[in-house]
Image (cartoon, helix red, strand yellow):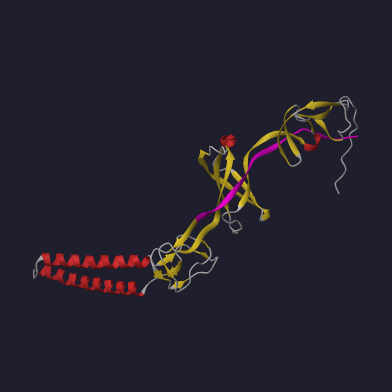
Amino acid sequence: MVTAGTVVMTDWQDEIQALGTAQANESVTLTSKVSETVTRVNFQDGDFVEAGAVLVDLSGRAEVAQLEAAQATFVEASKQYDRLAELVKQGTIPRSQLDTQIAVRDAARARADAIRAALADRIISAPFAGVLGFRRVSPGALVTPGTVITTLDDIRTIKLDFPVPEAYLGQIGVGQVVRAQSAAFTQAMFEGRVTAVGSRVDPLTRAVTVRAELPNPESQLRPGMLLTVRLMQPLRRALTVPEIAVEQVGTRAYLYRILPDDTVEQADVELGARRRGEVEVRAGVAEGDRIVVEGTVKLRPGARVRVVAPEAQP
């Protein structure tokens, strides 16, 4: 007694498996550009901030006072220019005197702009929206150029880089679906698409780096995480049989085909890809052939079989 099945034509989607490393979509280490004392810290560890948010204020009193003085000088120079311009119109003073005042006014404006730029270096803000790392400074601390303030990562989208053997290079393209899983979230499946394929093949590993982007709205994925990657290929049609129907002896694979008179014959088959419970058959059988699924242990070519229905699963 055996259970039987049929060779069927089904949709089949091949996949390339790899291990990839997650990276932030944008990442930066925020540092000081000047030597100054921290006046105010406006964030806490792990805060999400929008682009342009002021994180640390290093403004010194001396620079603020210099800016106020430079602005006052510019205002006075502008007023003097207006008075002289009126006198030039009346012909009371020569044009050269007005030109001199224009130079004075422009110099005052340039000095104010320079001080304003220096003050801007003392305001550390977020260049893009993202999640802040640990705070490395406190109010009152003296920082110098290069002192690390904190890190900022945009993880709403994760860049995933993974190596693919060069043998698959012709099967990789921008836009292909990528599915990734993490050991930290075993029940979650993160899906994205390939955005770029590396321009070089590593001569040591003979692999090319592929980059995909994965939406990460809940911020589950973090930069540096190791992910199991499956690069999905386009759907194709394939002949498939239950995996348990195939007998393998060394390099030979065969299954038992049921003939119209209920006898069986061995059919050598060429196997292709596998997936859960199924195997692709590239040659040796045809669509619609009846085959033995269970009960092959004692079968011999020419034996007559009696087909029974498989037991219901509890």
Which residue is pictured at 65% across the width and 40% down the height? 15
Which is more toward the observer, 237 or 270? 270
Magenta-drawn segment: 1-26
Residue 72, picture quadrant: bottom left
Q: Quadrant of the N terminus?
A: top right
249 is higher (above) or lower (below) than 163: above
153 is higher (above) or lower (below) than 137: above
**Left or right: where does residue 249 sit relative to residue 83?**
right
Q: Residue 115 placed where, x, y %?
A: 31, 67
Q: Residue 178 placed where, x, y %?
A: 61, 46
**Left or right: where does residue 236 sit relative to residue 314?**
left
Q: Residue 125 placed where, x, y %?
A: 44, 65
Residue 309, picture quadrant: top right
Which is more toward the observer, 181 or 147? 147
Residue 304, picture quadrant: top right
Instruction: Specify whether residue 9 is painted magenta.
Output: yes
Which is more toward the observer, 7 or 292? 292
Instruction: Specify whether residue 313 is painted magenta.
Output: no
Which is more toward the observer, 199 or 135? 135
Which residue is pictured at 28% across the width and 68% down the height? 112
